[in-house]
Image (tube, rainbow, N blue to C red):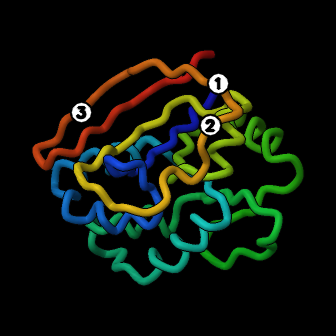
Amino acid sequence: MRKIINSTYISLDGVIEDPAWTMPYFDEEAAAFAGEQTAAADALLMGRRTYEGFAAAWPTRDESDPSTGAAYFNNVKKYVASTTLTDPEWNNSEVLRGDLVEAVADLKAGPGADILMYGYGAVTHALVKAGLVDEVRFWITPVFVGGPSVSAPLSDVPTTLTLADTKVMKSGVIIATYTTQG
C-alpha cells in the first residue's frame, strides 16, 4: 500500500501560508532532503489553492536545470481535490471526483510509490481525520512571520502522532517527522 506523506513548512509562530519566508533557509542540505522526498513519490495530492499556486509557479521554471525541481513538479502525476476546478491545465493533472476520502483511499490502495502533499489545509485535515495520512513532516523554520497561524487546526480531530525522526539542519531548520497511529 502506498504511503501518503504531508510535508509542511511552518514558522515558529505557526504560519504556513505563502512560505516564501523559507527561501533564506533552503540551502543545499534542505534541497537534498526535498529531493529525497520527491524521489520517493510518484504522485502529488493537493487542494485547489495549493494546485493553483503550484500551477502558476512551476511551469515557468527551467526543467533543464535539475536543481530547480521543475522537471519533477511539471511531469509527476498530480491529483487535485476540488469541487470547483473542472479542467486543470497543468500537465498530468487530474481532479478527484466524488467523495474525497473514498477517492484517496483508492489511490492509496493502488500501485505506485509514495503520494506527497505540501502544505496543511482542508484536504490534509480531512485525510488526517479519516486516518489516510501516514506521515507528517513539519519543516520548522526559525522565523516569526506574523499573521494567521495554521490554516486548518485539528480542534475536532483528537490525533496522536508518534515522533519518527528529527533532522536538524545547519540553517536552523528542524524537520520533525511524525507517523499517525494506525
The x and y percentages for residue 104 are 73, 42
Q: Residue 154 carries which label?
A: 2
Q: Is the C terminus in the top left, top right, bottom left or bottom right quadrant?
A: top right
The kind of secondary structure element at disc 2 is loop
The x and y percentages for residue 96 are 78, 56
Classify residue 93 as left or right of residue 37: right
Neighbourhood count class around disc 1 (C-alpha, 10 Å): few under 14, some 14–19, many 20 upward: few
**Residue in the picture at 60% in, 73% down:** 52
Classify residue 58 as left or right of residue 120: left
Which circle's residue, 3 or 1, is located before the other in the chain? 1
Label 3, label 1: how far apart the Cα atoms are: 26 Å
- Say which of 5 and 15 sits in front: 15
Neighbourhood count class around disc 2 (C-alpha, 10 Å): few under 14, some 14–19, many 20 upward: some
**Residue in the picture at 60% in, 58% down:** 77
Q: Residue 158 carries which label?
A: 1
Cβ–Cβ under 8 Å for marks 2 and 3: no
Disc 2 marks a residue whose amino acid type is Leu
Which circle's residue, 2 or 3, is located before the other in the chain? 2
The kind of secondary structure element at disc 1 is loop
Q: Which residue matches tag 3?
A: 167
The quadrant holding residue 33 is: top left
Disc 3 marks a residue whose amino acid type is Lys
**Residue in the picture at 23% in, 58% down:** 26
Classify residue 6 as left or right of residue 107: left
Cβ–Cβ under 8 Å for marks 2 and 1: yes
Closest to the camera, between mark 3 and mark 1, is: 1
Question: Is 78 situated above or below 168?
Answer: below
The quadrant holding residue 175 is: top left
- Residue 118: in sight, yes or no? no
- Residue 61: in sight, yes or no? yes
The x and y percentages for residue 156 are 71, 33
